[in-house]
Structures are given as C-alpha cells and as structure tokens.
Image (cartoon, helix red, strand yellow):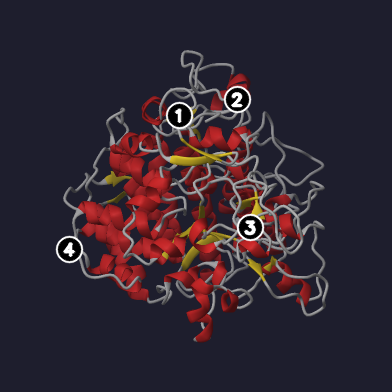
C-alpha cells in the first residue's frame, strides 16, 4: 500500500536539445543516434520517459493536472495575496506569455523519449520475448499519446514529429493542425498501445497498462469528436469513421463502435474494479488517521482503510518517492507538491484567535485542523460546487472539506484570498495524531512522515511539511471507463454501477444526468474543465456551456484576508476569457521567437498584443 521508501527512478538518460526542444547529435552524451545499445539501456530510457511526468510536477502550476483543476468552475485559483500565478490560472489569464515554458519543455522532452523507445533497434528488441517486447513498445506509444494529448489540450495546434530523432531544422517542424494531424496520431498511439499490451502485465507500479490505453483512447476520441467535430451528444450521434496514420498496432480507421468495444473489453477483463467505499480512494482513510477522524471512524472500526496507491480502481497515475530535493539534482517533482499547494493556507489567523492552552495565535495545520495539513491554500473549492451538489450524495462530503463543519479552529488567514472555507479533500495533505514509533517527532504530523520515520528513513529534502507527500496523482480511474461507456452508448448500466457504489438510487440515462454524474464523481480531479470544453465545441463563444459555467464564479462568496466579499474577474469576465481563448494557454513567447516565423509557430488567439485582458501583474483585491 505505501510505496514511498525505495522508489528508484533511473533518470540518467537525457536527450540533448537544440532550440529548447529539437534533438541534435551530441558525441559526448547519450542521444537518439547512439543510445540505447543494450536492454539495460532501454530500461533506463523507459524509466526516464516516465520520469518526465515528475519533471512536470516540479512546477505544479505547469502540470496539466493542476491546471485543469484550477481552470474549472469547481475551483478557485486562490492562494495568498502574493500568489499571482495561481490567480492567473483561475481567471484564465497569465503573468507573462512565457509562463508555461516549463510545461512546453516537459511535453517535448517526453515526446522525444517516447519516440526514441518506439524507434529502438530491432537487434535489441529481438532479445526480448514477444509479449515483453510488445508491452514495452506499447507503453511508449501510450506515453507519446499522453504527452501529445496534454500538449494539444494545453495549446491546440502544436509542432509534431514521430521519428526517433527530431528534425534538425526548425523549418522541418512547423505548427500542425490538432484537428487534422495531431489528434489522429494521438488516437492511433493509444490504439497501438491497447493492441500491443496485455492484461497480464503488472498493474499498480506506475507503468501504463492495456486498461489505461483503452481509457485514454476513449478520452481522446471523445474530446476530439466533441471539441473539434462539435458532436456534443455522442450517445445519440454517430461520427464518421476517423482515418488514422499507419503504425504498429493501429488500424486504418476507428469508429465510435470500436471505442465502445474496447471499453467493453476492459470491463469484461475484470482486471479493474470500483473500490467498495468512495472514501477509501483518498488518503485521509489511511490507518494512521482514520481511527481519530470522525468522518472515517466507521471505516476504521470495520478495519477498512485507504485502498492505497495503484489500487484496483486506478488505471494510471503519477507516482512519487522520497528522493525529492530543492537542490535541483533530482528536483521537487518526486514529491506530490500538488498536495502542498492545495492544503490549508497557513499563517497568522486574521482575527487574531489564540489557543487558550498556549496563548499562541492559531495556525492551520496543527491539532486544531486535524486531519488536514498546512500548505499554500491554492485550488480551493468554489462555493457553487458546494451549493449545487445535492446533500444526499455522500461523495459531496467525501470530496469537499467544509471547514466550519469539520475544523473547530480553522482560520481565515492574513494572506488568504479566494478562500470560501472549502478545500479539496482528494488533494489535501493529511496529518495523524500518532507520533512515530521511533519518537523522532510529535504529532500531529503528515501521515506519510510517520510511515517514513517508522521505516527509519530520513526525509530526503529535510522538510516533512514540504516533502512528505507520496499519494499518487490519479489520472484515470475505472469509474471513468464506466461513465464514458454510458455516455457513448446512452445506456445507464455502467453509470448505475458508479452510482450504486455511492449508495445512490437508480436514474435513467439522459445526457444531463450523465454530465451531473461526471461532475460529482470526478470533482476536483482535473477532468471537469475538458469535459466542459468538449460539450461546448470549438466554436465556443460567451454563450457556450463552458463559458456559462465558468462565469458563474462571478459573485461567489470568498474570504479575503479575514473578511467576506465576493469574487469578480480580475479584468473582464470568465465567459469572455473562455470565448477568447477556447481554454487554450499561451504558447511560450520564447518558442515563438525561436521559430521567428508565424508560418512555423504563431500565438494562440486571446494571448496576443491585440487582447489587453490576459496579463495579470498582481493578485486581484476584492
């Protein structure tokens, strides 16, 4: 269950680069021309490919996961009064047009590494048995599809290549149409991965699996058909067959029925399952915390605890280990900094409230806010999500920490901003009242720190509050496979399985019921934003579903430095910003300058000099 202590990440294999993302020959370091030459090299290369996901996590506000959480209508940017970047994300703005350069860099490093694995020499692959060979190449196809999916959902039309070595000239790597070129390749990659991989492969170890490939194939296909082809109701409409590029494991075309068949195959495989209680998906039900937490005492009394990283419902996620460091050698991407970013804002209580036992000013994250730890208070839950979510759905309180109900002394701090007193339990760091067996610290303490210290392992970065976060970032759950199957078929059978797990009554399939189900099931998991986009279509506009949903953030209640007020957009409106950008981010200016020709790479709409409402230079004052 707790895989944190001995995680090994072989990230020594690196690609050299020219002009930020183009590979070039280098005769002193490993590169796509002289590496790999052995199976051991190949295994290092594959580890480095997966390690790119942790490189994204070194800057959480450059990760597709947290960006999608904070850009949705369910969450605020929030943070402190100096966290301009977080507010910019939540308002569909940016602090500068080069802000997302780290995400761009990671995307193309990941693509390069996946391309290199796919292009591994036959002399090396022939030393492996067929099943192992297909599994490894299938994983590389999956990861390449994932990196391109992230890139295209962040920026739309992007440069692309699918060869072991990148073009050596920038003129050979122009910006490509996401609709006509990038997405057919993405879907082909996931299809190749699905066809090459086997259900016999190990699950839960951080590697891509056949089920993950099927889930992402459906996710990419549905986004493509909804956003680009503007088919908002796939349950009642049948798109034309989509032609795919020719490659190992992919067919010439794919249809909606093919995607349904693949999802049905995952379900029939019985390789994955829904965890019995929704709360068991989240780390606050761990055995160190659950017995003392009123919300989970019933589980503890029954001897049932957190399902753990890599559980039977987790098809794919980002894993972490005790190797993170601020020194830059490994970097902080190997601890789940999203937990740190999204935990309780902690500085002096704005009202000066004091602990009567100690006389000190209350700080969030201590015993008074057990079991939720201190952090940077970003990605807080928007008031609308609480108000619109039916109280009879137990997933509501399993997802949302309503501080006034659960935390006796939660403090609105002197620096808090878009804080409605609502936090995302799925992402918050969790404490325990128990000290370690080695008495290395007193409780309350991040529960992962107690696990680590009981194992006699020192915190690698020397700071438990910032380093002891090792819960997976879950990117795909089996529940998503079930709900996508229902959405594609218009049949409520799989949707009912998800509702049954939550203890909810049967309802008929309607598109609106399905949309609501997805919102409640995946709230705060980074799925909502792109669901809204695909249900709105690329034509968008201020009256589309996504724009209207985002605009409802206007006027919601928030606490600003200890006083209650209401949110407003920093410059224009959420609807206007969505209509201007269609949800895409600015292409880093540094990359556009390298290209030097808008025929090769041009800025996305809504982020150019002709639009004056995208640049956030300071946090909004409410």
Label 2 and label 3: CA atoms lie apart by 34 Å
Secondary structure at numbered mark 3: helix
Is 501 in front, or is 145? 501
Is 497 situated above or below 79? below
Q: Residue 96 carries which label?
A: 2
Q: Mark 1 points at which residue?
A: 569
Residue 469 seen by the camera? yes
Is 71 in front, or is 602? 71
> Do labels 1 and 3 touch, CB within 8 Å?
no
| Residue 364: quarter of image | bottom right
Q: Which of marks 1 and 3 is nearer the N terminus?
A: 3
Q: Which of marks 3 and 4 is nearer the N terminus?
A: 3
Q: What x and y, as percent, mark residue 188?
A: 40, 50
Q: Which mark is residue 46?
A: 3
Q: Earlier in the sequence, mark 2 or mark 4?
A: 2
Is 485 in front, or is 11? 485
Secondary structure at numbered mark 1: loop
Q: What x and y, as percent, mark residue 212?
A: 45, 62
């Amino acid at each position: 269950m707790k895989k944190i202590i001995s995680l090994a990440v072989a990230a020594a294999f690196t690609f050299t680069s020219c002009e930020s993302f183009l590979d070039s020959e280098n005769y002193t370091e490993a590169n796509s021309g002289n590496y790999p030459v052995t199976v051991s090299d190949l295994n290092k290369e594959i580890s480095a490919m997966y390690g790119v996901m942790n490189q994204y996590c070194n800057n959480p506000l450059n990760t597709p996961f947290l960006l999608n959480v904070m850009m949705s209508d369910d969450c605020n940017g929030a943070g402190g009064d100096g966290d301009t970047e977080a507010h910019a994300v939540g308002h569909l703005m940016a602090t500068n047009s080069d802000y997302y350069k780290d995400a761009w860099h990671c995307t193309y490093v990941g693509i390069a590494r996946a391309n290199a694995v796919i292009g591994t020499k036959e002399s090396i692959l022939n030393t492996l048995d067929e099943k192992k060979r297909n599994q490894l190449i299938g994983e590389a196809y999956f990861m390449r599809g994932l990196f391109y999916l992230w890139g295209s959902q962040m920026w739309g039309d992007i440069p692309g290549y699918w060869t072991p070595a990148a073009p050596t000239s920038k003129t050979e790597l122009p910006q490509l149409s996401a609709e006509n070129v990038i997405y057919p390749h993405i879907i082909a990659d996931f299809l190749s991965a699905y066809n090459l991989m086997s259900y016999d492969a190990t699950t839960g170890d951080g590697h891509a699996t056949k089920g993950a490939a099927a889930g992402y194939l459906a996710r990419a296909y549905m986004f493509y058909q909804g956003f680009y082809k503007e088919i908002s109701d796939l349950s009642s409409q049948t798109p034309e067959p989509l032609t795919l590029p020719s490659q190992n494991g992919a067919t010439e075309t794919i249809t909606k029925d093919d995607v349904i068949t693949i999802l049905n195959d995952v379900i029939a495989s019985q390789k994955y399952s829904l965890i019995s209680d929704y709360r068991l998906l989240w780390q606050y039900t761990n055995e160190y915390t659950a017995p003392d937490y009123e919300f989970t005492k019933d589980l503890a009394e029954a001897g049932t605890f957190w399902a753990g990283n890599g559980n039977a419902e987790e098809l794919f996620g980002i894993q972490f280990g005790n190797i993170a460091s601020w020194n830059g050698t490994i970097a902080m991407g190997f601890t789940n900094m999203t937990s740190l970013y999204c935990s309780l804002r902690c500085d002096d209580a704005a009202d000066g409230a004091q602990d009567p036992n100690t006389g000190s000013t209350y700080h969030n994250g201590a015993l008074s806010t057990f079991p939720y730890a201190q952090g940077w208070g970003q990605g807080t839950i928007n008031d609308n999500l609480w108000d619109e979510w039916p109280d009879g759905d137990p997933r509501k309180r399993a997802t949302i920490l309503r501080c006034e109900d659960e935390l006796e002394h939660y403090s609105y701090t002197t620096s808090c901003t878009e804080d409605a007193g609502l936090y995302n339990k799925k992402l918050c760091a969790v404490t325990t009242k128990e000290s370690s067996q080695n008495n290395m610290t007193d409780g309350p303490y991040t529960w992962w720190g107690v696990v680590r210290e009981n194992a006699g392992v020192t915190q690698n970065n020397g700071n438990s509050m910032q380093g002891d976060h090792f819960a997976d970032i879950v990117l795909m759950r089996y529940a998503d496979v079930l709900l996508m199957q229902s959405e594609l078929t218009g049949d409520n059978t799989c949707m009912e399985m998800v509702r049954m797990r939550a203890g909810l009554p049967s309802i008929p399939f309607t598109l609106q019921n399905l949309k609501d189900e997805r919102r409640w099931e995946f709230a705060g998991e980074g799925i909502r934003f792109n669901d809204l986009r695909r249900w709105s279509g690329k034509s968008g506009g201020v009256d589309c579903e996504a724009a209207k949903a985002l605009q409802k953030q206007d006027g919601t209640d928030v606490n600003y430095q200890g006083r209650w007020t209401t949110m407003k957009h920093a410059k224009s409106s959420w609807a206007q910003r969505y209509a201007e950008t269609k949800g895409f981010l600015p292409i880093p200016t540094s990359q556009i300058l390298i290209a030097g020709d808008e025929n090769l790479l041009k800025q996305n709409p809504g982020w150019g000099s002709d639009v004056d409402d995208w640049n956030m230079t300071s946090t909004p004052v409410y």
